[in-house]
Amino acid sequence: MSDAHLVLEALEKRFGAGPPAVAALSLAVQKGELLGLLGPSGCGKTTTLRMIGGLAEATAGRILVAGHDVTTLPPHKRDMGIVFQNYALFPHMDVAGNVAFGLEMRKQSRAEIAAKVERALAMVHLDGLGHRRPRELSGGQQQRVALARALVIEPSILLLDEPLSNLDAKLREEMRTEIRDIQKRLGITTIFVTHDQVEALAMCDRIAVMRAGSLEQLGTPFDIYESPATPFVADFVGRINRLDGARDGDGDILAGPLRLRAAKPGPAGRVTVMMRPHRLHIATDAIGPEWNSAAGTIRRATYVGDVLACEVDCAGAMLTVERHTHPGQPIPREGEAVNLAWRVSDTLAFDA
């Protein structure tokens, strides 16, 4: 952790006498890395970001930037840019004034401010819109103004608090690509708070999954998705089938009517079995020993354009299967008997 750009050491935040909103959180973020704080509402991710930015006082622990303790410094002395969920633009100022605000607080010259504002607006594709007021802009344009205002001060760390949550789905996808491109081009260390697992997987170098104020798992998007450390991570990051069962002395897992094998061995006892829906197939051929299988009946088939989701009743064990659609491929009928198959390597088992 000594060579990391941003370090959180046992960071804690309490409100009153209840359990901590953030509990002994330790993280190390490398220079130029984009780290996502991912989790459901109330898990402590925004509180963590606010402590990093100096907007909330830490109850315990330390925050280090380039080896310097900034835990008690006010926000304007931390060299950080922040983009809020609601953008927090000044309605009485035009776009250029909003972007220039941080530079004016730093007493820079008018010529220097004008040049930096122009460069910042060009960076977020808002050239020529400096004279407009925030109310005259679309949601996506307001988001770009907020990003330009955070970046124009050339901070060492960028903090993003769910900046895309107020945008529609298509614009959200476009903006996450733009933000990631800008972040990589500038090489700026970034903390990105989100409850959207797709955003986290698509944008981040690493993801810290949080639950009830604590760190549940830290890893790359691939690690988090393919090798979740807990049932909570598996369930929160992506869609999942979940069955309760028990592992016998031979390593087989009995989950209701199903006898399964899992990717990793474990001791006998109660287990939770989980499989991604898109890793399950409706089998048409014989399967080999590296596969699990189950016979079932189609209860519902839902067509959503690019994906077909089928709910299959396997003698009381309900499993969802997802597959990409193809022209001319028939949609399974309700009541149709099918055989499901999925690889043992795609079967996750967590000890109770």
Image: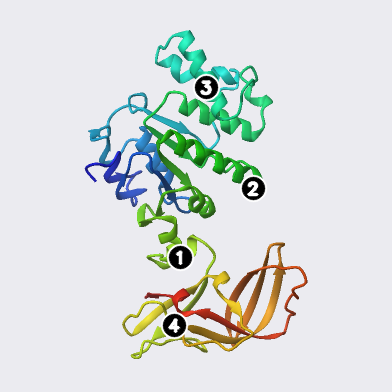
- Contact check, label 2 and label 4, Cβ < 8 Å: no
Q: Is residue 168 visible?
A: no
First reached walking from the N terminus: tag 1 or tag 4:
1
The residue sitting at 45% across, 20% down in the picture is: 102
Of the pair 62 and 127, the residue shown nearer to us: 127
Q: Which residue is mark 4?
A: 245
Q: Which residue is mark 1?
A: 234
User: Farthest top residue?
Assistant: 110
Of the pair 292 and 139, the residue shown nearer to us: 292
The answer for how far apart the CA atoms under marks 2 and 4 are is 38 Å
First reached walking from the N terminus: tag 4 or tag 3:
3
SS at mark 3? helix
Residue 8 higher or lower than 247, as above or below? above
Residue 108 percent coordinates (x, y): 42, 12
Q: Which mark is residue 119?
A: 3
> Which amino acid type is shown beneath numbered disc 3?
Arg
| Closer mark to the observer between disc 4 and disc 3 | 3
- Contact check, label 1 and label 4, Cβ < 8 Å: no
Residue 285 percent coordinates (x, y): 61, 87
The colour scheme of the drawn protein is: rainbow
Residue 106 percent coordinates (x, y): 39, 16
Q: Which residue is mark 2?
A: 169
Residue 102 higher or lower than 255, as above or below? above
Residue 349 higher or lower than 31, as above or below? below
The answer for how far apart the CA atoms under marks 1 and 2 are is 24 Å
The answer for how far apart the CA atoms under marks 1 and 3 are is 42 Å
First reached walking from the N terminus: tag 1 or tag 3:
3
> Which amino acid type is shown beneath numbered disc 4?
Gly
| Closer mark to the observer between disc 1 and disc 4 | 1
Q: Is residue 67 left or right of residue 336?
A: left
